[in-house]
Amino acid sequence: MKQLRHILAPLALVLSVSPALAEKLPLSAISAYFNGLKTAETDFQQINSDGSTAAGRLIIYRPGRMRFEYGPPERTLVLASGGQVAIFDSKSNQPPEQYPLKKTPLNLILERRVDLARAKMVVGHGEANGLTIVTAQDPEHPELGTIQMAFSSNPVALRQWIVTDETGSQTTVKLGAMKTGESYPSSLFSINSEIQRNKPRRN
């Protein structure tokens, strides 16, 4: 699980926005934002719990699918699809590590219907530097950790998240401007298709 925590789960970043007087977004507005979001693509910067950094491209295809493409030198690929998360290590000839998506806090934003008003789901809801900060957990499995999300308003947009795993390790993912409404083939998120593409070819 250590590698999964390193990729999915530091140091809290202060987003580069001008401080402004703003009221926090209601949970209903944030739930509606996720439920209305079909696809999104953006660049990201990741800060791991050991202080190391990585960057790449993120594609979200709700519900249930996500693709992290890490740039060099890692060139790691992380896919969420079919209820699983798979980590493809470009430096390894071994099959990808796989874990149930429902055991990661990211499942909360990839669910078919997001309802942050569910009992015991949101454990923090406030405002800082003009952003709405929401900390959520799986109410049925709070031991799996939390995801703290930062949202801008006008329009509502996810700007950052911090995943804290069950050991207390944290990973911050800072998002760039999102391009929404694009079309992507399902194969782009298919774990089995990626496994087949990475199989060694026989002579």
Image (tube, rainbow, N blue to C red):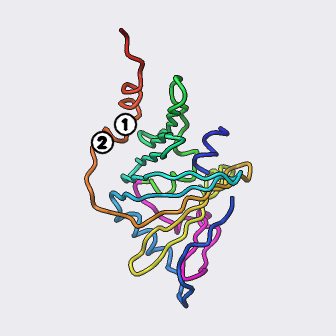
Q: Which mark is residue 186?
A: 2
Q: Secondary structure at mark 1?
A: loop
- Disc 2: CA contacts within 10 A as few (<14), some (14-19) or many (>=20): few
**Would residue 111 be found to the left or right of residue 126 on screen?**
left
Q: Quadrant of the C terminus?
A: top left
Q: Which mark is residue 156?
A: none
**Residue bounds of the magenta highlight:** 112-136
Q: Amino acid at mark 2?
A: Ser
Percent of width and height locating residue 158: 47, 67
Q: Which mark is residue 190?
A: 1
| In the depicted structure, whether residue 195 falls above or below residue 29 | above
| Tags 1 and 2 touching, CB below 8 Å | yes
Residue shown at the point (37%, 57%) measured from the top left: 41
Percent of width and height locating residue 130: 54, 82
Percent of width and height locating residue 146: 63, 58
Percent of width and height locating residue 187: 31, 38
Residue at the limit of the structure toward the right, as seen here: 167
Residue shown at the point (54%, 78%) measured from the top left: 131
Residue 153 covered by magenta stretch: no
Residue shown at the point (55%, 58%) measured from the top left: 173
Residue 120 covered by magenta stretch: yes
Residue shown at the point (54%, 27%) measured from the top left: 92
**Would residue 112 be found to the left or right of residue 12 on screen?**
left
Q: Amino acid at mark 1?
A: Ser
Real-space CA distance between mark 1 and mark 2, rounded to the nearest whole angstrom: 7 Å
